Amino acid sequence: MRIAYVCADAGVPIFGHKGCSVHVQEMVRALQRHGASVDVFAASVAGAPTPGLESLQVHRLPRVGDGEPVSHAPLVTALNVELAAALDRAGPYDLVYERYSLWSFAGMEYARAAGTPGLLEVNAPLIEEQAVFRGLRDAAAATRAAGRVFQAADALLAVSAEVATWLERFPSGRRPVHVLPNGVDPERFRPDVAPADPGPLGTYTVGFVGSMKPWHGLNVLIEAFARLHARVAATRLLLVGGGPEDAAVRTALADRGLLPACRLVGAVSPDEVPAFLTSMDAAVAPYPEPERFYFSPLKVYEYLAAGRAIVASGVGQLKTVIQPEVNGLLCPPGDAMALADALERLQREPQLRARLGRDARASVLRSHTWEQVAARVLHVGRTATRRGRERRTGARA
């Protein structure tokens, strides 16, 4: 099977270190392991290929960001003309798989015209996300592009039920919506990986991995750790990742006198993350805003696969992924006191930590590996192929 993987989002470098970049890399690897030959069509690359993707064929697309409507329209047109032409030059393909971006629609329209299944992966309500967190000047064009690409796709693959609900606002016609949460590579993320940054003997390490964005709830984590550290002196906070909240996090820790009890690693490559996870006794996902939680958080699946005892906010998909007292603990979002209490409980009960960690990994192996995600994608693609044949047969009849 030949698959065209389209990622026209200039903010998603396919060989980068961000979570979105890791998602692209893992999906491509998983599709390859299922025997597919994958070509990537990308607007952003960012560096050398990551391990296992050195021979990947990459077709470069124009980078298009948000802009003033008058000057922006020709750039959007040029992106889609080039995408269609690049697919035509490199094809034919058995499947076109695209990561939804604000300005791209030619991939799904090309697939539909060619009679090839077109699957669109939707990771977020990008129009609202862009407007709230980065500003959106050409909202009308983004809405038109969304309508076109959703209409052209044979199926929409939403990473969460919340994203699937957002998709209901757009006319989808015959296109079904499948909820396909993210996954993890359990061979990379294992409990037996040697820790990269173990704490001093007898120290209990609370950890977080992420890009330090406003929606990660780091202020809640800092307040919870301050409470925990006041109760249990032999505690350490390990923060892995960098981002827009990095300076604010350092200031908040300094203001509370917590820096001596903290280790801020900064941004690391994806290959380094597993060894930092096994440096943690408890891993935290303290998301604060349930009304804006539409994610399928990679970090949580990585925590699970690494066999960490997890404390997460009871929001969105986490309420189904984390079974309280079975493979982790849940806290009310934004509740620093409840988070501190849960972390203290895990510190006092090492046997509970161990049991939660074992069951965490078992839950990932059952249903949340990238291999399983890719298998579902290919199943949806085969179903779309059958439907297409039936439509064409019916039309001839």
Image: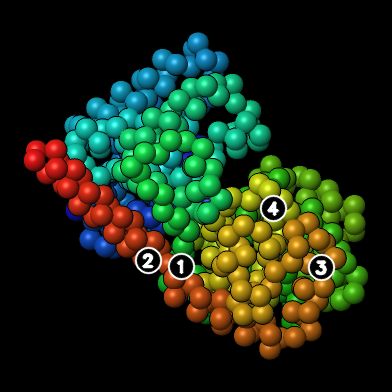
Amino acid beneath label 4: Pro
Q: Which residue is mark 1?
A: 368
Circles 2 and 4, Cβ within 8 Å, touching? The answer is: no
Residue 372, numbered circle: 2
Circles 2 and 1, Cβ within 8 Å, touching? The answer is: yes
Query: Horizontal placement of 183 versus 286: left or right?
Result: left
User: Which image quarter: residue 335?
Assistant: bottom right
Percent x, y of residue 339 = 78, 67
Residue 290, numbered circle: 4
Which one is earlier in the sequence, the residue at label 2 or at label 4? 4
Residue 196, visible in the rendered structure: no
| Picture residue at 68% right of the left edge, 63% below the top | 314
Q: Secondary structure at mark 4?
A: helix
Amino acid beneath label 3: Ala
75 and 396: which one is in front?
396
Circles 3 and 1, Cβ within 8 Å, touching? The answer is: no
The CA distance from mark 2 to mark 4 is 28 Å
**Quadrant where the image shows the C terminus:** top left
Amino acid beneath label 1: His
| Picture residue at 42% right of the left edge, 19% below the top | 75
Query: Horizontal placement of 192 versus 254: left or right?
Result: left
User: Which image quarter: residue 380?
Assistant: bottom left
The CA distance from mark 1 to mark 4 is 23 Å
